[in-house]
Image (cartoon, rainbow, N blue to C red):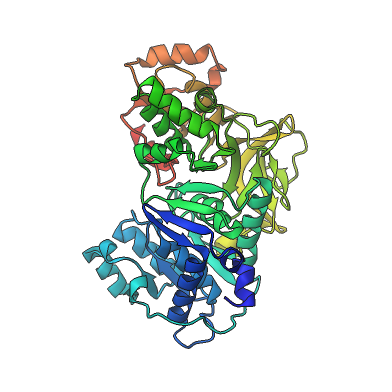
Amino acid sequence: MTAKSIEWFPSLEQRPQAIALVDGDRELSYEDLNHSVNRVIAGLLDGEASLNEERVAFLYPASFEYASLIIAIVAAGGIAVPLSVHASADELSHCLSVAGVKRLFLPESLRSGGLDRVCEQLSVTQLSVADLPGAASPASLPITPEQGALIVFTSGTTGKPKAVVHTVESVSAMVTSLIEAWGWVDTDVIPLFLPLHHVHGIVNILLCALWRGATVDLFARFEAERVCEKVVTGSYSVFMAVPTIYVKLIAYLKTLDAAEQNQITQGFAAMRLNVSGSAACPVPLFEEWETLTSQRFLERYGMTELGMALSNPYEGERRPGHVGQPLPGVVIKRVDENGDEVTDASTPGELAVKSPTAFREYWGNPESTVKAFADGWFLTGDIAVIEDGAYRILGRASIDIIKSGGYKLSALEIEATLLEHPDVSEVAVIGIPDDEWGELVACALVVSQPLSEDALTAWARERMSGYKVPRRWHFTEALPRNALGKVTKPSLKSWF
């Protein structure tokens, strides 16, 4: 690739014989990936000098094609728009429309009548990487720090997903910050089974590994047995997942005999790093994983608009329930409802962030972009306190902070306490409108043994202040979650 492209992903030429990607029995070297990227660039440009920030979408699972597209689109001057392979036609229509996409890459296996109709309505051309002609390396392509690089949609847990635009500079800053903070080396090998339309899978795993010249083992979906087969062989040095995945791994381990369990837990113990993120990790899960594997999760905090902003240390104390300190280059303050800085560590305040990783805009939504910032500080909407120098997230101001009888209550704090009950498997706490109290604490939960509301209330009163104890309970077989395992809390209100 050209000198400008090398700045985008230097490993493509620096480690030609190293293995970049593994997909089952297939391996792709960095030289192979470089060739594939150049082929896609040439096919995208078709003789033009630059894509000039054309939004190019793609609908691929973790694959060689996905990796080639996300690197090549940016190198060609476009904005990469990765979409969820599990999205409905209506959800894809929203994303394609908001981003103004005119070209969508996808394998034949993911085409459908519903998607065909959406693309026809929006004048979107459907293409496959396999359809692109073979071509020599493209001419020199200028890549500037401020050019748009990536659109990732917000998770949509509190409203319609917004199209978050990251630049070459912000993506590069996200990647290099994590490489430094988490000690990435070119000999690292990491599995990738997380969704590839969110920052966790895209940036924290795929782009960090490929930027550093490490190896990514691709899985189209998470399957505990398949992943553990590789863990036993000592293939992996790093493991990143959401709490739900770790719960599934523990459940799988419990189906095995002691010898098989020991092989797998020793495989995890031999790794240099286990990371949990994208949703709060319950303290009991943190402790059970450490008991099984001797691994203390590295928990961190990030957002679609920022990438990662806070992290527990790679070397040093990692405290359960806390997300550590600001990453290199990140400046954080906490503000109250009036925008004034909160200086007392124990007083809750909204996280406001300045960082080279911050996004440029919400595509096509200038009003929301303006509202997201105050004097250059990005307002996260997340409330936190500082305990012994480490940040603890109390929840989203919009959904996780419950205003009841003059108190401001943290839904996450109440959830953490309820999860200490031996028969409570999953829990989600929200506030519901009430004429007398403003909001009442309501709880939806999954239990492993039948429990009565009275028994739960009595148990909770022994462990938390009376005003924090849920007034409404709803038992269910499963909580509604998005692709990253986050509970979609607005949908719970219909249960109360």
x, y percentage for residue 446? Answer: 36, 26
For this rendering, which residue is in front, 34 or 82? 34
For this rendering, which residue is in front, 109 or 157? 109
Q: Quadrant of the C terminus?
A: top left
- Furthest toward the front, the residue is 17
- Furthest toward the bottom, the residue is 47
Q: From this view, report whether residue 454 is shown above or below residue 194.
A: above
The residue at the point 78 percent across, 38 percent down is: 343
For this rendering, which residue is in front, 129 or 322? 129
Q: Looking at the rendering, which quadrant does residue 16 occupy?
A: bottom right
For this rendering, which residue is in front, 275 or 346? 275
Q: Quadrant of the N terminus?
A: bottom right
The residue at the point 35 percent across, 37 percent down is: 225
Q: Is residue 439 something one can see in this rendering?
A: no
Q: Looking at the rendering, which quadrant does residue 59 occupy?
A: bottom left
The residue at the point 54 percent across, 31 percent down is: 269
* For residue 283, side relative to residue 456 (left or right): right
x, y percentage for residue 420? Answer: 49, 19
x, y percentage for residue 251? Answer: 38, 28
x, y percentage for residue 302? Answer: 59, 47
Q: From this view, report whether residue 268 is shown above or below residue 89.
A: above
